[in-house]
Image (spheres, rainbow, N blue to C red):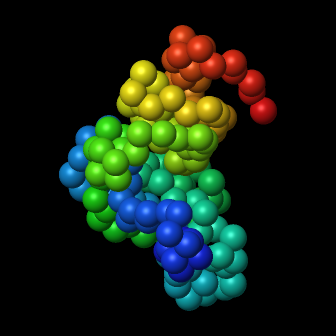
């Protein structure tokens, strides 16, 4: 969908990879396209398609137990932040926006703010446990950013 909507603009390069702590392959978990058929009743699949994560438990916590059977997984290629930036020759970022369904801290902690310094950094802290929230807050503040919780 991203490639269809933005690929032809010339402003974006679409990478079909997951950003993780190491390169290689891992599983990504999501809601099955045939969820209604599996359950034998209507499921609003488009509304649930935003629930995808490298952590199966993160997907399951958003679903009632009777919906756990509608999750699927596929293998996805992973790159580290450093590899992704190097691969795309990125030296400047205006807005770093991380929305990685519970994987935000794993991505954020790889970011070298001395190498690339975004003007604005946004990430979902409510998906992090208290320890990771505190670590993220410290990292952002130590890098000289002002922290605003929304």
Q: Which residue is drawn at 38% across and 65% down?
A: 16
Q: Which residue is drawn at 43% across and 49% down?
A: 55
The picture places residue 120, in percent across and down from the top left corner, at 64, 34
Taking the image as shown, residue 63 lies to the left or right of residue 142, namely right
Which of these two is toward me, 31 or 144? 144
Which of these two is toward me, 113 or 100? 113
Is 131 situated above or below 119?
A: above
Is 34 situated above or below 143?
A: below
The picture places residue 38, in percent across and down from the top left corner, at 52, 83
Q: Which residue is drawn at 50% across and 63% down?
A: 12
- Asked whether residue 109 appears in the rendered view, the answer is no
The total of numbered circles placed on residues is 0
The picture places residue 98, in percent across and down from the top left corner, at 56, 43
- Asked whether residue 104 appears in the rendered view, the answer is yes
Which of these two is toward me, 123 or 12? 12
The picture places residue 117, in percent across and down from the top left corner, at 51, 29
Q: Residue furthest left?
A: 24
Which quarter of the figure has residue 122? Answer: top right
Task: Indicate the quadrant containing the N terminus: top left, top right, bottom left or bottom right.
Answer: bottom right
Is 38 situated above or below 146?
A: below
Q: Which residue is drawn at 29% across and 64% down?
A: 75
Q: Which residue lies furthest to the right in this view?
A: 150
Task: Indicate the quadrant containing the C terminus: top left, top right, bottom left or bottom right.
Answer: top right
Taking the image as shown, residue 48 lies to the left or right of residue 102, namely right
Taking the image as shown, residue 80 lies to the left or right of residue 55, namely left
Which of these two is toward me, 149 or 120? 120
């Amino acid at each position: 969908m991203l490639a269809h909507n933005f690929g032809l603009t010339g402003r974006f390069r679409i990478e079909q990879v997951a950003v993780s702590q190491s390169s290689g392959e891992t599983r990504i978990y999501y809601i099955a396209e045939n969820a209604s058929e599996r359950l034998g009743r209507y499921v609003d699949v488009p509304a649930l398609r935003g629930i995808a994560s490298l952590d199966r438990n993160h997907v399951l916590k958003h679903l009632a137990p009777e919906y756990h059977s509608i999750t699927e997984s596929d293998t996805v290629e992973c790159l580290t932040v450093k590899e992704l930036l190097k691969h795309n020759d990125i030296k400047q970022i205006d807005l770093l926006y991380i929305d990685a369904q519970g994987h935000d801290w794993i991505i954020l902690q790889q970011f070298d703010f001395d190498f690339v310094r975004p003007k604005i950094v946004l990430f979902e802290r409510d998906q992090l446990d208290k320890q990771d929230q505190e670590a993220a807050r410290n990292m952002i503040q130590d890098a000289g950013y002002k922290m605003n919780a929304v």
